[in-house]
Image: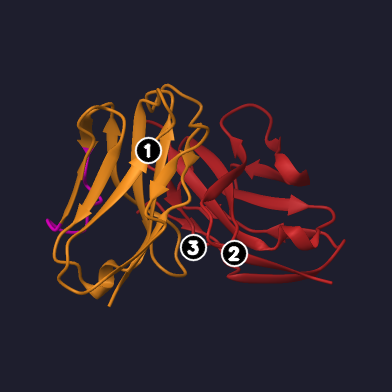
Chain colours: A orange, B red
Amino acid sequence: GAGVSQSPRYKVAKRGQDVALRCDPISGHVSLFWYQQALGQGPEFLTYFQNEAQLDKSGLPSDRFFAERPEGSVSTLKIQRTQQEDSAVYLCASSLAITGRSNYGYTFGSGTRLTVV
Amino acid sequence: AQSVTQLDSQVPVFEEAPVELRCNYSSSVSVYLFWYVQYPNQGLQLLLKYLSGSTLVKGINGFEAEFNKSQTSFHLRKPSVHISDTAEYFCAVVYSGTYKYIFGTGTRLKVLA
């Protein structure tokens, strides 16, 4: 597609429920990132994929968070046993080049707004 | 710790007036600098970036920013704002040799008629 597509746009989950957030990057983009944006804050790094390899998951806040990109294209961010503090906008970004060798031309999706009640 | 500071959480300005949104980062090592705009319920759109070369960077929608290494700043400016510029603006830094964006907390620009 022309841009990074994220679904669903909005998700309301009851506390304790599992959720899965999807990211469709731009076709052919090698690098994929997930960021978490809490209300009134800037986005914060969660995890980074280069193709199907998850090279950095240092930003995942707990072991309830899990991300995958099995075929090097679509990625899913899964949150188990959601808590109220997980409420945030989850942003996905992709880039054609391998990070560190590019001009950092990341394209962000519109995000998924997760509300845990 | 590496960080980005946007001191102004909100900036009200009248239409057609100039505006400056301030951004400072914490380290003077080699960095790449970015400004993003976020309209309500939308993702981040790149306004401009500094990677190397000229310290004055021009971006989309008439915005520009100047990289000042000695002051570790990258302030965003526009000589004449429009109502449509009302949005949240984020400054971000990537430190050389890394790939993570470090974002500031954002500045809400409100353009008044």
Q: Position of residue A104 (x, y in %)?
A: 48, 31
As measured in the structure, the alpha-carbon distance from the residue carrying label 1 to the one carrying label 2 is 29 Å
- Please name whichever residue, B45 or B14, is drawn nearer the observer in this view of the structure: B45
Residues rendered magenta in the picture: A56-64
Q: Is residue A59 magenta?
A: yes
Q: Is residue A16 above or below residue A91?
A: below
Label 2 SS: strand
Q: Residue at image x 63%, y 58%?
A: B22
Label 2 sits on what residue type?
Thr
Q: Could you say which quadrant of the image residue B53 lies in?
A: top right
Q: Could you say which quadrant of the image residue B98 lies in?
A: top left
Q: Which residue is mark 2?
A: B107
Q: Which residue is mark 3?
A: B105
Instruction: Tell if the residue under mark 1 belongs to the same chain as the one under mark 2.
Output: no
Q: Position of residue A32 (x, y in %)?
A: 35, 35
Q: Which residue is mark 1?
A: A24
Q: Chain of mark 2?
A: B
Label 3 sits on what residue type?
Thr
Check residue B7 in the rendering and tell me which mark sits there, or answer none: none
- Please name whichever residue, A84 or A105, is drawn nearer the observer in this view of the structure: A84
- Asked whether the viewer can see residue A88, the reply is yes
